[in-house]
Image: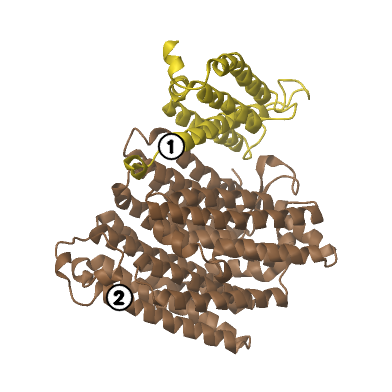
Chain colours: A brown, B yellow
Amino acid sequence: MIAISHIIPLFVAISLLGAFIISIIGKRLKWIPDVIGNITTLILLGLSVLAMWTIVTKGTLVYSVGSWKLPIGIALVLDGLTAFMLITVNLIAFSVSIYSISYMERFTSKWKFYTLFLLMVAGMNGVVVSGDIFNLFVFLEIASVASYALVAFGTERHELEAAFKYTVMSSVGSLFLLLGIVFLYSYTSTLNMADMANILAQKSASNIIIMVIVLFITGFGLKAALVPFHAWLPDAHPSAPAPISAMLSGVLIKSLGIYTLCRIFYNVIGINPTLSSILMILGTLSMVIGVFLAIGQWDFKRLLAYHSISQIGYVILGIGLGTPLGIIGGLFHLFNHSVFKSLLFLNSGAVEYATGTRDLKKMGGLIAKMPVTGTTSLVASMSIAGIPPFNGFWSKLIIIIAAVQANRLGYAFWAVLASILTLASFTKVMKYAFFGKPRKRWSEVKEVPIFMKLAMVTLAIICVIGGVLLISNINQIFLKPASDVLLEGTKYADIVFKGIQ
Amino acid sequence: MSKEHDAGMSLIVKVITRFTVGLILLYGIYIVLHGHISPGGGFAGGVIIALSFVNLMLAYGKDVALKKLPRKTISFFESTGALLFLSIALIGFFGGYFFLNFISKGEPFRLFSAGIVPFCNIAISLKVGAGLFAIFIALVLLKFDWEKKE
């Protein structure tokens, strides 16, 4: 009987295996990339469900790569937050890879797309499972570098420009992170995050830690596109092919930015009131400025990209509150935002696939011609705007209630305001794109192929029933273990060391 | 011989390159194989191996270099290197742990020692050598459609 902890390295190994097999034989056999890409993501999704189940039954698991003794060797850790992120990443990856079967037909060399896509998934899964801060950085770079190439996938002039801008900004972010890791390593002489947390707790406060916190806020802020660092996102996300926009907005900025931010600030360094208010201020800034920038956009995907900045603000605000309710709300909104923002980007891709335009002024009355795209888009829009009973409503409600409970009425006010403005801007999208007068030039438009419909409908169903996750039994399995990890703070170290034996 | 004179650099450079390019390649292989007992290893050796082909290309032009190592072969080697590395890790996985060093470690400081480390070095050198040469080709040769029209 093999120990259950052996599933942890598989999240990285299987996706890398799929990527390299596609790059060897996918060039000659045209059907290989689709088949292997989808099977790989399906296996990963199955494994993540298994991982979540393991967390409920067995608790935190630790895996030592190469059977080296911890904390000297590389540790992979599977705890509640990890399982939660794995489900989010692999769910979106699976629906995106189904969608790509039809969508990527219009591009040449599909095998390159799937190779890079699986490399990106490997990087994101690696970031999430890693318990070693330098490995976290390596996987973060794998995912980032794959995403630079994917943003430039169309190789048109503006796509290359956006990819270059993204590369420069994101590399600067990576350098900040590397510098922060160097300082932490020189201060604690260890790279294992649990060990690091123990040593930091023993040492008295030092100015180096403040320096590291500043570096990490800048670095992870650049990766997560929080407001002062957001300039690359509105260029990069619309320029990528639609499935990749869905991946970037849906999960990349979350696993590379928010997950890492939470993991290091809550579990390694330890949260304090100053840090918490910095996070809340950054969150509120992103929330409000993002939505104000979004409301004037006429490019469908660019509008969605600005909304990503705004919704990330909600997540950071919820997590920054630091109360149990706030953290649950933030994490729940993270999951919900992954689902509905990916769905919206897939919708925008479907519209572009059928009509060839992204300009909202040129669309109109498309719901008559494209019922599935129109309906799913309506569901996603209502979710992101926070209309009951869709999932976005519940998470925003929890965040606002948590802010009121923590006596942070100002933040609650801004959250409500941003939500109203989101509703306004999505009313605009719905009116101009799908409702309104049918235009003559779209009379020949057909609904998109079956695989694209399948992916969109799956995500739409999750949007509708997302509120179910709050029912206490399901909450115990899915959200509670994840928020517990953050609430335990630096006790993370003890839990990981207990898991080793 | 006459065709080789058409492209590339002057005769002096070509003659010197002909003497040195084999030595550079050999030195790269030496660095790879001794990676576990002396400084260097898969990455450094792979870079030197790639440099020998880059040198060939600079001196003789792209045709000679790409005839020695066609683009398809490069991309094949690159993926094979990665797969080889992953399969070493996976064999260890089935033997107990991911990246488990399942071969006997031998005596330290001997050429045949350190278990899987030399094999990992060979896989890395394939990946790095082919990858670096491919990047060089991409930067030198490939052009986009709109660039060709101008």
Judge whether B29 appears above or below A464 on screen.
above
Look at 42% across and 74% down and name the residue there. A294
- Tell me the kind of residue under disc 1: Ser
The answer to whether residue A417 shows anywhere in this view is yes
Return the disc, 1 or 2, that comes first in the chain's sequence. 1
A223 lies above or below B46: below
**Do dots 1 and 2 share one subunit?**
yes
Residue A138 left/right relative to B68? right
Q: Based on the displayed image, in which of its 4 quarters is residue A408 positioned?
A: bottom right
Instruction: Identify which residue, A421 or A326, lies in the foreground.
Output: A421
Q: Which numbered disc covers residue A430?
A: 2
Rendered location of residue A265, percent (x, y): 68, 66
Viewport quadrant of the N terminus of chain A = top right
Residue A240 location (% of width, % of height):
40, 55
Q: Is A296 left or right of B127, judged from the image as shown?
A: left
Residue A80 seen from this side? no
Q: Residue at x 46, y 31 (%)?
A: B75
Label drawn at residue A23: 1
SS for dot 2: helix
Distance between mark 1 and mark 2 Cα atoms: 40 Å
For residue A160, above or below residue A27: below
Specify the amino acid type for callout 2. Answer: Met
Front residue of this view, candidates A1 and A497: A497
Q: Residues within 10 Å of mark 1 (few under 14, many from 20)?
A: many
For image coordinates 71% across by 65% down, the residue present is: A213
Q: How many numbered marks have been drawn onto this rendered protein structure? A: 2
- In which chain is the residue bearing label 1? A
Q: Position of residue A243 (x, y in %)?
A: 38, 56
Q: Secondary structure at mark 1?
A: helix
Q: Quadrant of residue A410?
A: bottom right
Query: Which subunit holds the residue at mark 2?
Result: A
Residue A478: numbered disc: none
